Image: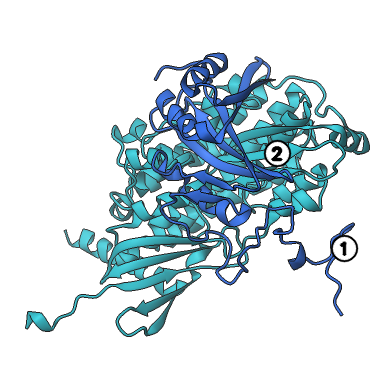
Amino acid sequence: MNVLDAKAVIKSYEDALDGALLNSRVYEREVGARKHVYTSLWLDVERSGFRAAVSHVAQLQDSPHFSVIAQVDLGDSVDLLYHFSLFTGEPNKAIALVLRVTLSKTDLTIPTITDLIPGAIFSERETQEMMGVTVVGIPDGRRLFIPEDFPEGVYPWRRDETGPEEMLNVLPGKQGIQHE
Amino acid sequence: MSDTIHKTSYMLPIGPVHPALHEPIRLDLDVDGEEIIDVDVAAGQVHRGIEWIGMNRNNAVQTIYLAERICGICSACHPFAFVLAVEQAAGIEVPVRADYIRTIVAEVERMHSHLLWAGVAGHEIGFESLFFYVWRIREKVMDLTEVLTGNRNSKAMYQIGGVRRDITPEQIPIIRASLDIYKEAFDEMRHLFLDDPTIKLRCRNSGVLPTEDALKLCAAGPTARASGVPTDVRQDHPYAAYADLGVKAITPDVITGCVVGDTYDRIIVRLLEVKQSIELIEKALDTMPEGPILTEPKIAKLLALLKKAEGEGVARVEAPRGENIHYVRLKAGEDTLQAWKVRAPTYANLQVVPTMLKGQQIADVPIAFASIDPCMSCSNRAVVTNKTDSTVSFLDGEKLHALSVEKTRRLNAELAGK
């Protein structure tokens, strides 16, 4: 495995994605008495270049380690953050890699990555049921955590009209449903 | 005659819920006689929406307590990952001494979790004396946790910007004495687990997870390491004091010279990790620097700072079961988190369960499934559905456990007869 530092990883992405890399940010933090530098790398990619970005992870490391997809409702758009670990198995050299794709609420679809990383299936199923993002080409589209009798079209992590608001009890500072 | 015999498979769902433990689960087994043909995992029977509460009700400091209650056993590694992520999002520094205390508490938790698991593993195969032996010595680590944190379980040590309690000079001899007990007990435990013919018979070549499947399915922690993947968050991207202490991922070949990826290998890895934790705690106590333990002790000031902060952070810690990751996003002007995503290691490890169980016998399910260290409460109740006539019969946890015990007894008798 050819271990790169964060800057070299960004460079390799710029070459591989051909303009689909929108933004990049490196976070570094010193930990412990010896001031070891903990690194996380944040890359924003366009949806058109998303598959290429994931393929590129697999080129940087054979069998890349995928952790989870985090989903954020931002009002008009939804952020999907794919969390990877680059260079696992290399002492002190691993980098936390985050690939961010921003989807407009008018077109909430993302291609599957399970053909590249089979271990992403649970997270893709969760993304579909919790955030209402359609994963195109998902091999198993069933719900994962939400029970079968949960209503269709309600997505627990959305902050808009498709959110679970109506199913909630009253919380401090929130107006619950007014029962007659 | 043969044309009148219909070969049929049965659906055997195992699970789903026991309210006392985290991560309830249901396994749907397709069985042909005793053999398992296919497995489906159905999760989420008690999805508590904890992330939602952190995003809608609690402020960041209150969410530490919530994170602590995600799991009864991992009450250090969830708040640990959470505070690391918040510190990254808000740009908060941590004193070095706090890094060490965080590390010590996390390693005590690992010792506890692995010992608890070792006892459960003995119980699953009907080796009750081993179960009682291990849980007796586990009691000492509970006492140690109480000395360090004031609680036997929910530790409440982690705070954004440091830890809530110091390790005082009076506590250090107590911690060392407790570690000495474990060093003495370790050789006996190693002998009991690794040399015992019963354990070898039940665990060798059972629940095999090949290396390439562990990599492909992104397995985490001892489950991945037992399959020969040398990955450990403490080694790969060290956080807190782990870079100072130096951690090497443990794979089973250090003892046996080869990697099989079975239940036995997972026992080896966890057993050696108990020893590794003892050594890490001792080294941390030796080298722990003096100094403050918290950057901002005033909660009101901390909350004001967090309310102003804008940013996002991601943190991984090596929980006893493997990589635990928290993602946090803060928005200026909001008390609650804008986003919070938690992925516990069992989430990843459940994906390897079908690979592990295919081709096994029903009696192997308790120990093979337990070997990834999920919550085994799940097999408390099982339903057997006959596919041909849709009849349903119930197979409860006791019956399943009895099957497992019976198999151990049978193998024992065969061993004695040899």
Label 2 to label 1: alpha-carbon separation: 26 Å
Report the coloring of the rendering: by chain
Instruction: Give the image quarter of residue B282.
Output: top right
Where residue A168 sits: x, y (%)?
77, 65
Q: Chain A is which colour?
A: blue
Q: Give the residue at x 76% y 62%.
A: A165
Residue annotated with mark 1: A175
Where residue B214 sits: x, y (%)?
38, 41
Say which of marks 2 and 1 sits in front: 1
Q: Give the residue at x 80% y 42%.
A: B60
Q: Nearer the viewer, residue B273 or B286?
A: B273
Where residue B61 sits: x, y (%)?
81, 43
Tell me which amino acid carries mark 1.
Gln
Tag 2 subunit = B
- The residue positioned farthest toward the left in the image shown: B1
Tag 1 subunit = A
Tell me which amino acid carries mark 2.
Val
Residue annotated with mark 2: B328
Where residue A111 sits: x, y (%)?
48, 43
Residue B64 visible in the displayed image: yes
Q: Residues within 10 Å of mark 2 (few under 14, many from 20)?
A: many
Quadrant placement of the C terminus of chain A? bottom right
Instruction: Give the image quarter of residue B324.
Output: top right
Q: Residues within 10 Å of mark 1 (few under 14, many from 20)?
A: few
Q: Which chain is cyan?
A: B
Q: Secondary structure at mark 2?
A: strand
